[in-house]
Amino acid sequence: MNKIENKAHKFGMVIDLDKCTGCGSCMVSCMSENNVPFKEDESNKKDSITWMRVYKLTNGKSFPDTEIVYLPRPCQHCGGKGDHGHSPCVSVCPATATDYGYDTGIVSQIYTRCFGCRYCMGACPYHARYFNWWDPKWPEGMEKYLSPDVSPRMRGVVEKCSFCFHRYQAAKDKAYYDGRDDIEEDEYQTACTTACPSGAIVFGDLNNPAHRVHEIVKPDPHPWPNNPNVVGKSRNPNVFRLLERLGTNPKVYYLSEREWVRKAGDNYLDGEWDKIKNHHGSESHG
Amino acid sequence: MKVDRRSFLGLGLGAVAGFSVSPVLLKLTDDSSIWTQNWPWTPVPVDGEVSYENSVCSLCPGSCGISVRKIDDRPVKIEGLDEYPINNGGACLHGISGLQYLYDPARVKSPLKKNGDKFEEISWDDAISVIAGKLNDIRTAGSPEKFVCIADKDRGSVPELFKRFLKTFGSSNFYTMPGFESYLKLTAEAMHGKGMTIGFDLENSDFVLSFGAGIIEGWGSPVSCFKANASRKEREAKLYQIEPRLSNTAAGADKWLPIKPGTEADLALGICSFILKHNLYAATAAVRFKGGLNKFAAQLQNDYSLSKTSEITGIKESEIEEIATLFAKAKMPIAVFGKGKGDASQSLKEFIAVQTLNCLMDNINKKGGVFIQPVKTYLEFPEETLDDVAKEGNEKPRLGQYVHDLFEKINTSSQPVVDTLFVYQSNPCYALHDTKTIKQAVGKIPFVVSFSSFLDETAKEADIILPVHTFIERLEDVPSGAGLSKTVVGLSKPVVKPVFNTKLPGDILLLLAKALDGTVAENFAWESYDECLETVAKNIWDSLFQDGYAILEEGVPEESVEVNVAFLTGNPSSIQATGDGELMLIPIDNMRLPSAAPAASPFSIKTVSDEVLKGRDTVVEINPKTAKGLKNYDYVALTTPVGTAKVMIHLNEGIMPGVVGMVKGLGHSFDNKYVSNKGVNINELIGPVIEPGSGLDAAFGVKAKISKA
C-alpha cells in the first residue's frame, strides 16, 4: 500500500456571479448534506443557520436602471494575514475549537470543543458563523434522514461551513483503499458545487495548476504590492474576494464581468476604487 | 491572627496565583462545555453501508433524474443525477428537499374519513367499500356523468388510469389543473393542428426574446432552463426579458424591458407588425401561413403601428424597433411565452401572438428554434369495454371546458351537477383564483375523495382522504413535457419502503374498480399497478427498467408545419384587469416557493428572503415612487375587488411605478408549522377573468388599493 504523500492542498472555490441565479439550490443542498436544522420561523436571518447564504446585491440605481446580483457566501476559509493560517476566527478561539488545516487550507469547527463564547463570530468579517441558540428539533420521524457523516449540533455551540470536509475524508479513504497517492479533482466536490444547476461554483485545489479553480483564479504567488498581507490575489481582472484588503486571504473568489459587482466586494473611499481597480496581482506575473 | 490590609492582599494574590496555575480553571471550562452539550435528545444518526439509487423527481413537470444516497435503508440525501438527459447533474432546491416531504408533518398517515369537523382513521378496506358504495349508487341512479375527477396533469399511466376509470364508469368529466404543458398543447392545437405540442431548443438559440417567461424562476423544466441560461455567455447568445418587474430572469438578461402588465400580447403583435412592414420576416415563412400573410399584415399595420404599440405597452418606439430588428436579424431567434412559471392563468392570445413571431422567422423545426410536433404517446392500454350506463354517460356533454368552468357551474346551478369528486395530487382550493368560491363549490359537492400525500387545503375539504405514496416511495412513469426540446420518460422507483399506511394511486384505482358494478372491473384486470405499468409501457419497458429512462424524441423534428392565425384575425380584445384601484397587483413567481401542489418544504421556506416573508407576513414590492411616504416593513391593507389582506411593504426600485408585486406560494393553512400560516395566498385576492375566444382564466393581475394599516 502506498503512503499518501503529505502534499499541501489549498482548497478553494470561485463563484461566477454572472451565472448565479439566486435559485437557492446551494443553500438547500448544504443544509441537507450537513444536517442543518430549521425552526418554525426562519425569517429573522440573524439567527437563521445557513452555512451557505445567498445575498442579494443591487447597484443602487433607480427604476429602470436597477440591477441585481446574487452572492452566495459560504465560510471564506481565510488563510489570515500573509496566508499563514492565522484566520480571524482561529486566532481568537480560546478552546481550539476552530483550527486551520495546513494540509488543506480548510478552517475546521469542532463542535464538542466549542463552549459558545462566540468570539469567532465577532472576529469573522463575513458573518459566516452561526450560534445555536436552541437545540435542533426535527419533526417526528424526520431525524431519519440525518446523515451520519456530520454530527448534529447542540445548543450552545457555533457552526459554519466546512467545505464538506467529510467528503474530502471519504475521497481520501477511497484513494487510500485504491492504493492511490492523492485524490482527483472530481472526487472531492462540496455539496453546493455539485447541486448548482447553473454550474456557477467551481471548487478545487488552488495549489494545483491543473484544477479549474486555479485556471480561473490564477492566484498570484507573490504578495500584493499594495498590501503585503494580501496573498494569492487573482490575476484575472474579473475575479475578486470579499473585503480583500483586510488581508484575511479568503479562499472563496468571486467572478463578475460587471464593475459595480466587483466594487461591491469591498468598501471604498471616494475615488479610491478608480485607483486600485486595475491592480491585478504583482506586475511580474500580471 | 489579625487580618490586616497587607495579609489580606497577600492572601488574595496568593489565591489568585494558586487558582491560575492549578488545573481547576481548565477542568471547569472542560466540564462546563461537556455539561452544556450533553443533551440526549440531540439525535445521533446511525451509520451504515452507503449506497446510491437512481430515480426521477416528479415534484414539478421538470422530471429531473435524481440520485438518492442511502445509509442502509435510510435515504439521507437527494442529488441531481449525472448524465440524465434532462438535468445532467444539477438539481433544484425542491428536489433536494425531497426527503422533507417524506416525513412532512402534514402527511396523511392512513386513510381518513370525515366525521363532523374531524377526520377519523379508517382501514383501506372500509375506505374502498364506502367509496365504491357511493359510486355504485350514482351508476344505479343513471347519472354517471356526475362523477368528476381533477388531476395535476394528463400524461403518464396514472392520469391515464384515472381517465380510463372515468370513461368505463361513464363520465367524460376529467379535468387537469392549469399547467404550462396544457397551454403548449392548446397553442399548438390552435395554430398548427390537433395533437401537436411545442418545445423550445433554448440551448441552441442565439437570441431569446422572453415575454415574461421566468426562465430561471421555474419556467418549463427548471434545471434544464438553468443550464441553457448558464451557457449563454459561452454561446454568445442573448436574452431580452420583457416584464413589469426586475425578476431574476430580467436581472440576468442582457436587457430588461419593463412593460405595462397585461400588454405582452400587444407588444408581440406590434413587433410582428414591424417585421411584416419592413419585410424582415423569413422568405420561407409566408407559405406556411394558412391563407397567406397579406391580410394578416394589413390588419396588424392598422391595429399595431409603432406609435400605437408604444402607447399601449409603455415601451419606447425606438426600443420596439430595436428588439424587432435584433430578433429578425438573429441567426436562430426564439420568442418564448408563459409569464412566470408558465402555469396558473395565461392568455391564449398572448401565446399565439408570441408564437407568430417564431413562425414569421421560420425557426420552426430547426436547430435552436421551436419544435412543433405531435405529442408522443408511449402507453398502450387495451380497448375499453363499456356497458350501457357508461356509453350513455360518456355521450353527455362535459360540465365545462376547464377546471374553473366546472367550479363556476357548480356554484351557479341550483341543481347538484357533481355528485362525487376525485381530486388527485392537486390543490384547487389553494391554487385557483378566488379560493373562497372554489371552497364554496367543493363544499356543495356531496362526496369528495382526495388522493393526496398531504392534508392540504383541498384534502381538508374532502370526505375521504386516500393517502398516496410520495414520489420517492413510488413506482411510476414520469413523462417530461414543459416545453423541452426532447421527450424523455423517466421511471420513478421506490427508493424507500412506504413510511406510512399509504398506497400507489394506481393500486387504489384497481381496488376501487374491482369493487364496482358493471364492466368497470373488467377494464382493470391487472393484479397490481406494477403489472399494469409493465404491460402498458411494454414498448419502452426494457429501456425504462435498465436505464431508468427512455428517450421518445430527440433532435430536430422533420414535420412540416402549417401556421394558422385565425385566432388573431378574429381580433380578440386583450384581457383587462378588474377593479378600480389605482395600483395593479401582479403575482411574482419565486423559484424558492412552489406556487401550487405540493407546498414548500421547511428547507425551501428557510431560503426565502426577508424581503418576501417576514415572520407571518407577506412582504409586497412597490416602487419608492408609488410608496407615498411608506417605509420598508410598514403594514398596509391591500384591497382588491376580491379581498383584503394585511401585508408589509418593501420598496423596490426594480418594479414599475404603479405596480404591486406579491409572491405566489405563501398563505397555506394546514398542519405544518414550518410552512403554513405564513403570509397571504395571492389567489384570495385575484378573481378569474375569462378570455374571450379561449375560455381560459387569463387574469394577469387585479387593480388594487393600499392604505396604511
Image (cartoon, coloured by chain):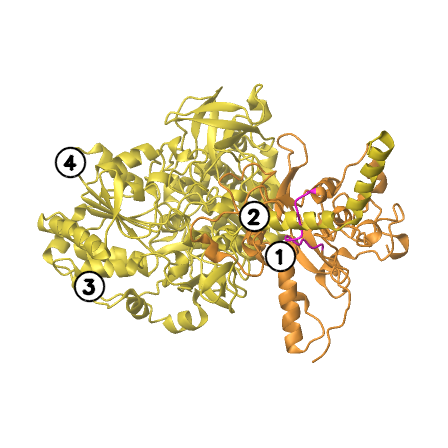
Chain colours: A orange, B yellow
Secondary structure found at label 3? helix
Secondary structure found at label 2? loop
Residue holding disc 3: B523
Q: Are marks 3 and 4 in contact (CB under 8 Å)?
A: no
Q: Mark 4 or mark 3, which is nearer the start of the sequence?
A: 4
Residue holding disc 4: B415
Same chain under badges 3 and 2? The reply is no
Q: CA distance from mark 3 to mark 4?
A: 32 Å
Same chain under badges 3 and 1? The reply is no
- The chain identifier of the residue carrying mark 3 reads B
Same chain under badges 2 and 4? The reply is no
| Residue A55 pos. (x, y %) | 63, 42
Q: Mark 1 or mark 2, which is nearer the start of the sequence?
A: 2
Q: B274 and B464: which one is in front?
A: B464
| Residue A35 pos. (x, y %) | 55, 53
For label 3, the crowd category at 10 Å Cα-Cα, with few meaning under 14, some 14 to 19 and many 20 or more, is many
Q: Nearer the viewer, mark 4 or mark 1?
A: 1
| Magenta segment | A107-118
User: What kind of residue is marked 4?
Assistant: Gln
Secondary structure character of the magenta stretch overall? loop
Q: CA distance from mark 3 to mark 1?
A: 49 Å
Q: Nearer the viewer, mark 2 or mark 4?
A: 2
- The chain identifier of the residue carrying mark 2 reads A
Residue holding disc 1: A193
